[in-house]
């Protein structure tokens, strides 16, 4: 900005700083003549417009971002949190860390409806003094699959048909009927919880299993949960249809207005923990994201509270370009060997380098604003400044004797986690136990929730082929008699119709499941 221009000067200019005196008329030869091509003002305006969109996210395209702060309790329940993790953001009572959150739907495009029956994304970026930490979760606590290699398939089945471009329950249930690990997620998704009332009234879950590491290098497995102080509310399909008739963005509106009105929403962060081993005593694998950890055995304990108190200034800059990833962790918080988590960790930054660009981490919303960033990364599209922290600008390599960036002092970091060994293999984890928690979840539902789930299953599975319907009734009978019988009744399928079905190829059954199969229905 030139020195003569005042900060509040409203004069419109080009990006080159040229004042614009006519923004209504293209330059032409005479009032009715042809347009000329040297008209920089017009060319800059229209060609910038032509490039206004970046690719939308391949999943979670529609979302809404807000900012706030996380306040730590310094405890895990009643115990000092340092017993379990050395992550700095948790260490002092009342310590505040800036956060950005993006809530989202998964399957629809960038302008799709926010009342869709769909999982909701719940992604939180903590701008800590040790660099950024992203906790990228959902509102349902579990997921459809447990191995990242199946992610493109599950998403293709849920996305619109490649020809008709319609989301098609026949395709969805075709895939799910061949993937029994999806039953727990489906029982959640097709219950009332599958359409949260808005973003303020839903829970969030990290879903995957992570590790906490303390200063002695000891590790524990953990799962994260966000509990809304506003309570949890859901919509029936009828409520959802009524909202959608006049608003496809009600959840963004609700959150934006609450924050504008000073009615700041809050979530408590609670953490479940278990020792870092494979827990042979459990009937599920702690690294399986289709399972929840029973709260009576692994009680969730408070570690802090998040308050959202500021809206974004620009949708594109702060929502379209914000980039989360499961690999973005700080000292004291670690991965586990959860096979989804490792696949996710590659996928997020890979897609962001394509979707936003090689230098996506230089954007203000993504940069580690509360930590010092010092890299030898140079160049690439839209590179913006260097982060040498006053070191010799000729040196963009390491090691160097000429005042370049240097490795930090040894952190005293110790090797973490149990010792592992094994042959390279492609095999499912043991203890798949695909039906048990789906059945438990159904039994925990209130009567009206069961009715809603059964109706939604009948309506949707009813669009699939007879073969798929029968396999789905078989799975639901394996989860829980009442669920299988009622959905079967709605579809005109009895246990006798499906008793002859063999387990799917590659499907593992527990002894209890074999017994169930022998007495189906
Ligand atoms: C977004 C991949 C599983 C939650 C995304 C994106 C990709 C992706 C490519 C788009 C990111 C972007 O463009 O910035 C995967 C893969 C998975 C997986 C490969 C499994 C192997 C999950 C699970 C959850 C989840 C289990 C929930 C716990 C999210 C959320 C977003 C997202 C919340 C949106 C982030 C945002 O708001 O920008 N995922 N995902 N994903 N995923 Fe996943």
Image (tube, grey):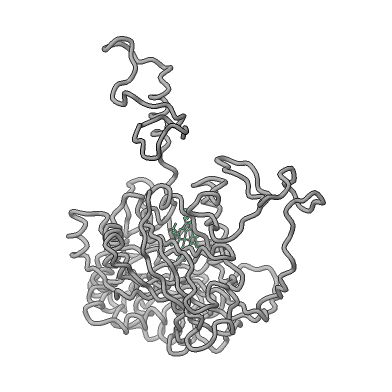
State which quadrant residue 265 falls in: bottom left
Compared with 92, 159 (above or below) is above
* Residue depicted at 45% across the width and 50% down the height: 321
Residue 422 falls left or right of residue 432: right
Frontmost residue, 482 versus 447 = 447
Counting labels gives: 0
- Determine which quarter of the picture holds residue 494: bottom left
Task: Answer whether residue 115 is visible to the viewer in this image.
Answer: no
Q: Position of residue 488 (x, y in %)?
A: 27, 74
Vertical relation: 216 (above or below) 405: below
Task: Indicate the quadrant containing the C terminus: top left, top right, bottom left or bottom right.
Answer: bottom left
Residue 353 visible (yes or no):
yes
Residue 20 sits above or below residue 98 on the image: above
User: Is 512 or 52 nearer to us in this picture?
Assistant: 52
Where does residue 226 sit, x and y in percent of width and height? 41, 74
Res. 4 image quadrant: top left
Q: Percent position (x, y) of residue 63?
A: 37, 56
The residue at the far right in this view is 401
- 469 vs 331, left or right, is left
Classify residue 400 as left or right of residue 186.
right
Residue 266 lies, in percent from the top left, at: 36, 71
Residue at the spot 56% in from the left edge and 47% down from the top edge: 359
- Give the residue drawn at x 25%, y 77%: 449
């Amino acid at each position: 900005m030139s020195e003569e221009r005042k900060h509040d000067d409203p004069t419109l200019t080009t990006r080159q700083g040229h004042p614009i005196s006519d923004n209504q008329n293209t330059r032409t030869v005479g009032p009715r003549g042809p347009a000329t091509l040297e008209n920089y003002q017009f060319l800059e305006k229209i060609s910038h417009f032509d490039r206004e969109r970046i690719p939308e996210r391949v999943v979670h395209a529609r979302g809404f971002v807000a900012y706030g702060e996380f306040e730590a309790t310094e405890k895990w329940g009643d115990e000092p949190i340092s017993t379990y993790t050395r992550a700095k953001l948790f260490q002092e009572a009342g310590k505040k860390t800036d956060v950005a959150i993006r809530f989202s739907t998964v399957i629809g495009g960038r302008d799709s409806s926010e009342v869709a029956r769909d999982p909701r994304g719940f992604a939180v970026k903590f701008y800590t003094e040790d660099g950024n930490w992203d906790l990228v979760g959902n509102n349902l606590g579990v997921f459809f699959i447990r191995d990242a290699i199946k992610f493109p398939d599950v998403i293709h089945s849920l996305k619109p048909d490649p020809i008709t471009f319609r989301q098609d329950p026949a395709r969805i249930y075709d895939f799910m009927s061949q993937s029994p690990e999806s039953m727990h997620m489906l029982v959640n998704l097709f219950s009332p919880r599958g359409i949260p009332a808005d973003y303020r009234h839903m829970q969030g879950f990290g879903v995957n299993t992570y590790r906490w590491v303390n200063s002695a290098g000891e590790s524990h497995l953990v799962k994260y949960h966000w509990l809304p102080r506003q309570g949890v509310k859901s919509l029936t399909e009828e409520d959802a249809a009524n909202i959608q008739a006049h608003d496809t963005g009600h959840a963004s509106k609700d959150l934006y207005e609450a924050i504008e009105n000073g009615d700041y929403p809050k979530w408590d962060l609670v953490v479940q923990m278990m020792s870092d081993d494979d827990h042979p005593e459990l009937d599920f694998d702690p690294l399986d994201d289709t399972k929840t950890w029973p709260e009576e055995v692994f009680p969730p304990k408070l570690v802090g509270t998040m308050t959202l108190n500021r809206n974004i200034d620009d949708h594109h800059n702060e929502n379209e370009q914000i980039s989360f990833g499961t690999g973005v962790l700080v000292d004291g918080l670690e991965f586990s060997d959860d096979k989804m988590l490792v696949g996710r960790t590659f996928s997020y930054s890979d897609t962001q380098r394509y979707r936003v660009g090689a230098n996506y981490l230089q954007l203000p919303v993504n940069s580690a604003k509360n930590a010092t960033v010092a890299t030898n990364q140079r160049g690439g599209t839209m590179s913006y400044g260097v982060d040498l922290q006053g070191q010799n600008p000729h040196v963009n390599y390491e090691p160097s004797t000429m005042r370049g960036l240097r490795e930090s002092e040894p952190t005293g970091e110790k090797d973490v986690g149990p010792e592992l060994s094994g042959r390279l293999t492609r095999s499912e984890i043991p203890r798949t136990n695909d039906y048990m928690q789906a059945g438990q979840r159904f039994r925990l539902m209130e009567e009206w929730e069961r009715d809603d789930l059964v109706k939604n299953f009948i309506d949707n599975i009813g669009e699939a082929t007879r073969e798929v319907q029968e396999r789905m009734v078989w799975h639901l009978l394996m989860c829980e008699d009442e669920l299988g019988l009622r959905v079967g009744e709605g579809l005109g399928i009895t246990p006798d119709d499906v008793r002859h079905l063999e387990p799917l190829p590659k499907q593992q059954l527990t002894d209890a499941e074999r017994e169930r199969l022998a007495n189906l229905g």
